[in-house]
Each structure stands twice: as C-alpha cells, then as structure tokens.
Image (spheres, helix red, strand yellow):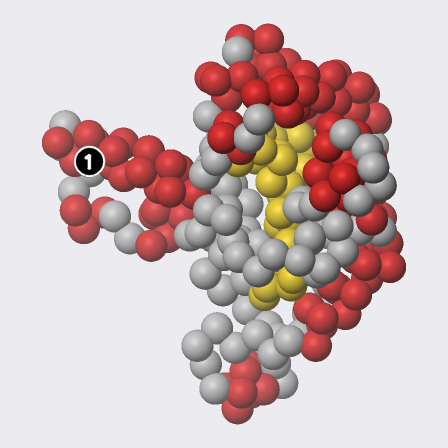
Amino acid sequence: MTQNMDLPTHVAVVMDGNGRWAQGRGLPRVQGHRRGVDAAREMTTLCARAGISYLTLFAFSSENWRRPEEEVSFLKTLLTTSLQKEFKRLHANNVRLKVIGDLARFGSTLATQVQEAESRTAKNTGLTLTIALNYGARWEIAEMARALASECNEGVLTASDITESFISGRLSTGDMPDPDLFIRTGGEIRLSNFLLWQLAYTELFFSDTLWPDFDEAAFNEALEAYRSRRRRFGRTQEQVDESTC
C-alpha cells in the first residue's frame, strides 16, 4: 500500500439527492431518479476513461423500501428497464457487470436479467461496475456470519480459519479490492449502511452537490481531494516515506 496514489483503484458512491433535485425544480421525485440514471452512466464513463478499475454504486438500499409505495414501484421498474437499456452499451465498452444485494424481493424477472448480464460480461477486462440493489451492510455481514457458523457446525471450518482476510473474501465484494475512495453526494454526512466492513480504511468525500448534478467537474474535485490525502494505514509518515523510497 502506498500513499497519495494518483487515482483510486476502486471508487464507491452513494448516489443521494435525486428526489430533492426534482422537487427543487417543481418536478415529481421520480423525474430525479430518471436523471440519476443519466448521472450514473456518466460516472461509469468517467471512471472507465480515467482507468479506474472498479466502481460500486449504491442504487437501492434495504431501507429504501420504507419510501412511498408509488416511488418504490417506480424505482423497481426503472432499475429493470435501465438494466435492459444499458447492458449492450456496457458490454460493448468491455465493462464487467456485477450486482450485490438480496434480489429476491425484486422478483424473478430482474434476478434472471442480472444473472444473464453478469454471465455475459464475466470475461470483460475493463471497468468492473458493481450495482448494490436491496443491499445493506449489516444484512451482508449477518448473512456471512450465519454461513460461517453453519460451516463450523458441520466441521468444514474451525474458529481459527476465520481471519479478517477470510471474512473479506466471503463478502459480496470478495473478488475486488476494498474501495480507496468513497463519495456521497447530496450533502448528507453518513455511510447509511453501505460497505461498512470494506470502508474501514477508505478515504471519505462528502459533496453538497445533488447526484443528478454530479458531473465531471464534481468528480474531479473528489479525485483532487483523494490525491491530497496521506494514506498511512496505521503507520507513521516516516514509515510510509521509507517504504516508497
């Protein structure tokens, strides 16, 4: 691990502010979600163009089911249609698609589409785009803990097998590095149950910009903030300087 890397390898984003963006313009909240899809497409393009290897977007949290029924229904439909529309473009641009979260509540149609998209893009070598749907970090950790407890009971694992690196590998992001940069838009300053384990040493960037307005200039501001950080991972600055000589 080194300090002041020019670019993060993995960027994770909480895309917040779609509804407020629409309301501020006298539009229904759902119009903000439509514009949010455009912003997600732009972010994917920016990351791929910059040479960033992994982008993880928090599209629908396990807590979002508490929103008004009409909005939730629209989001479910938007997610399904967006996946259909965006798949060919992503595949043509060598993007590997991955979806994390509990998809059962979305129904079999979306689950089948996700499985097909993941399978067809599995060998792509460009950006890995991960979409978090009906995802919550506490849910993820609890699911993993139950699985490990079961395997210990069956004698497949012993308690000594369960190390930090072992746990990391069993999470839904186990095939990718932890995020280097976390971005949250919309002016809120919290993680909102997103990748809690994975963000332990991630650089955090909070922006007042609402997600539909988070453009290339805003992204560059986040990257500049990342470049200015001194990433020590528990070491002293002297130790970091020595390791980079």
Amino acid type, callout 1: Ala
Counting from the top left corner in percent of width and height, residue 184 is at 64, 54
Q: Which of 198 and 79 is in front in this view?
A: 79
Work out which residue is located at the far front of the displayed protein and give it.
26
In the displayed structure, would residue 94 be above or below residue 111?
below
Q: Residue furthest top?
A: 109
Q: Which residue is drawn at 67% across and 20% down?
A: 74
Residue drawn at x 19%, y 30% is 150
Q: Name the residue located 60 percent from the left edge and 40 percent from the top edge.
A: 58
Foreground pick, 30 / 143: 30
Task: Residue 77 in the image: state x and y as whole percent.
Answer: 67, 16
Residue situated in front as seen by the camera: 55 or 241 = 55
Q: Residues within 10 Å of mark 1 (few under 14, many from 20)?
A: some
Residue at 40%, 48% (x, y): give it: 168
- Which residue matches tag 1? 149
Q: How many labels does the image show?
A: 1
Q: Residue furthest bottom?
A: 238
Say if residue 176 shows up in the picture: yes
